[in-house]
Image (tube, rainbow, N blue to C red):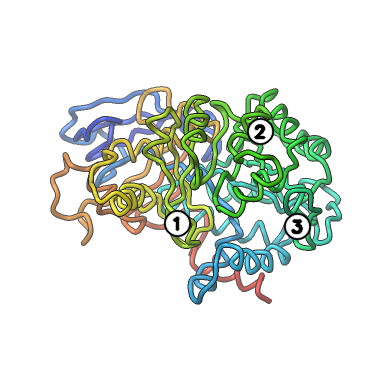
């Protein structure tokens, strides 16, 4: 094992900003390998130790993007204008999903994950449901699409939890439509058989997802939950994103989607509900009482006109909060954190619902936990050596005292202020440039152009 020392001009140590911190990290192996851990943390160092790598600015734990659909990045700029709803947006989204192949998905995801690294993201939860060829025919390798995403994350230098998603119907009692055929394995048992071939590796974890209660019949929910429970894997589910889904669930089952999930054993501390927007008081109690997590995606929820979910009430009830960029209208976890507080201010006309520290934990430690990466998202000995540094001298961040770094990060900084991203003890982003993917904007443009051709 080899080691590297990083001297951090300022570091966020979970509760406060500490000046002059040296991290010793193990660096042998791959950029996102399990061996890349922090072995020592020293504070009170006014000057860098000899040979240390100097990181000027404020260093935060690596950020966790807990909810991603990588191919949605191709929609940016094409769906933000005009009228419509989530359901009209979905038709445009399907047109891009129809064009994906393992090769084109790899190229796009590699560029998207590189964009995430440039934004300080060190781990992503990929909610993956485009499994088969158009029409539903499996590829020669039934997991070719998922393997493409795992390989893309490796080349972009970040960790991934592949949340392989069961998607079996287009609505309650309805067969998949023509677009959704490539999402479906037919039954939850067939989904589980295919998923069981996927394996963890140093930079990748395999988790599970239920697309939604409308996409997995009630009688098959327990199969997916059992698969995740047996493997102690994370389980995610889109939950009550749209009122139309709630209404349809009431009509089909006489209960809310949350109650349906609870009745079929889906809720629990390894489960995360994504969006959790349109909930009853009973729903909130069920989620909080079972310690089911909540992943909010504010930039997508506002882009799609979904609404503002009861995140404050959910946290108070016992539901841990994580954050995701979902459809990638923007990729900026600091903006997602900021939007949580600002959305709540608009909704309630009061301020101060979360501290900056609480929002940073949602974007880092709690996000990693939701993705099954224990011992990540914190700068302490034994943790994964994943961290990111933001500039304190940009036009957005200049001025505030360094000791107010958490507030500066959450309420002033953006992804454009990220200067360095380190994963597994190795630089993935150095001085604002990706070290593994040359010219990320070109990689994004080329990958998206290939889908439009």
Residue at disc 2, secondary structure: loop
The percent position of residue 280, horizontal first and vertical second, equals 49, 40
Query: Distance from label 1 to label 3 (Cα)?
Result: 26 Å
Query: Distance from label 2 to label 1 (Cα)?
Result: 26 Å
Left/right placement of residue 234 relative to residue 363 reads: right
Q: Quadrant of residue 71?
A: bottom right
Q: Which mark is residue 331?
A: 1
| Mark 1 burial class by Cα count in 10 Å: few <14, some 14-19, many 20+ | many
Question: At 61% across and 63% down in the image, what residue appears?
Answer: 87
Q: Is residue 129 above or below residue 34?
A: below
Q: Which mark is residue 180?
A: 3
State the residue in front, 451 or 367. 367
Query: Distance from label 2 to label 3 (Cα)?
Result: 27 Å
The percent position of residue 281, horizontal first and vertical second, equals 46, 36
Left/right placement of residue 200 relative to residue 23 reads: right
Left/right placement of residue 378 relative to residue 56 reads: right
The percent position of residue 206, horizontal first and vertical second, equals 65, 36
């Amino acid at each position: 094992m080899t080691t590297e020392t990083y001297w951090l001009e300022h570091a966020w140590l979970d509760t406060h900003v500490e000046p002059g911190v040296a991290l010793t990290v193990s660096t042998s192996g791959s950029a996102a390998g399990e061996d890349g851990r922090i072995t020592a943390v020293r504070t009170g160092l006014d000057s860098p130790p000899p040979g240390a790598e100097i990181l000027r600015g404020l260093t935060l734990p690596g950020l966790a993007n807990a909810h991603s659909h990588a191919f949605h990045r191709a929609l940016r700029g094409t769906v933000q204008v005009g009228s419509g709803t989530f359901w009209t947006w979905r038709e445009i989204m399907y047109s891009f999903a129809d064009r994906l192949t393992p090769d084109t998905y790899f190229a796009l995801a590699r560029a998207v994950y590189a964009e995430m690294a440039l934004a300080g993201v060190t781990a992503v939860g990929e909610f993956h449901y485009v499994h088969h060829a158009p029409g539903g025919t499996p590829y020669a390798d039934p997991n070719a699409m998922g393997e493409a995403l795992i390989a893309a994350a490796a080349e972009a230098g970040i960790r991934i939890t592949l949340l392989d998603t069961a998607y079996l119907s287009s609505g309650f009692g309805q067969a998949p439509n023509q677009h959704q055929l490539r999402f479906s394995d037919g039954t939850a048992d067939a989904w589980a058989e295919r998923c069981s071939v996927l394996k963890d590796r140093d930079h990748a974890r395999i988790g599970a997802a239920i697309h939604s209660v409308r996409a997995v019949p009630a009688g098959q929910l327990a199969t997916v939950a059992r698969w995740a429970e047996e493997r102690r894997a994370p389980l995610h589910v889109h939950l009550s994103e749209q009122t139309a889904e709630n209404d349809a669930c009431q009509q089909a089952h006489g209960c809310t989607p949350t109650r349906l999930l609870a009745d079929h054993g889906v809720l629990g501390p390894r489960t995360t509900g994504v969006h959790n927007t349109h909930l009853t008081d009973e729903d909130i109690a069920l989620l909080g009482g079972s310690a089911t997590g909540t992943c909010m995606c504010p930039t997508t929820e506002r882009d799609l006109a979904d609404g503002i979910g009861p995140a404050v009430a959910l946290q108070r009830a016992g539901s841990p909060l994580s954050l995701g960029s979902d459809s990638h209208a923007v990729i900026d976890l600091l903006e997602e954190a900021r939007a949580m507080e600002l959305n709540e201010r608009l909704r309630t006309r009061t301020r101060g619902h979360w501290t900056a520290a609480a929002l940073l934990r949602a974007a880092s430690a709690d996000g990693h936990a939701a993705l099954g990466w224990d011992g990540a998202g914190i700068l302490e000995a034994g943790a994964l050596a994943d961290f990111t540094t933001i500039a304190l001298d940009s036009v957005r961040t200049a001025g505030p005292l360094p000791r107010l770094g958490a507030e500066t990060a959450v309420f002033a900084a953006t992804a454009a202020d990220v200067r360095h991203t380190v994963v597994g003890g190795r630089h993935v982003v150095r001085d604002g440039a990706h070290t593994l993917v040359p010219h990320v904007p070109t990689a994004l443009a080329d990958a998206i152009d290939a889908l439009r051709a």
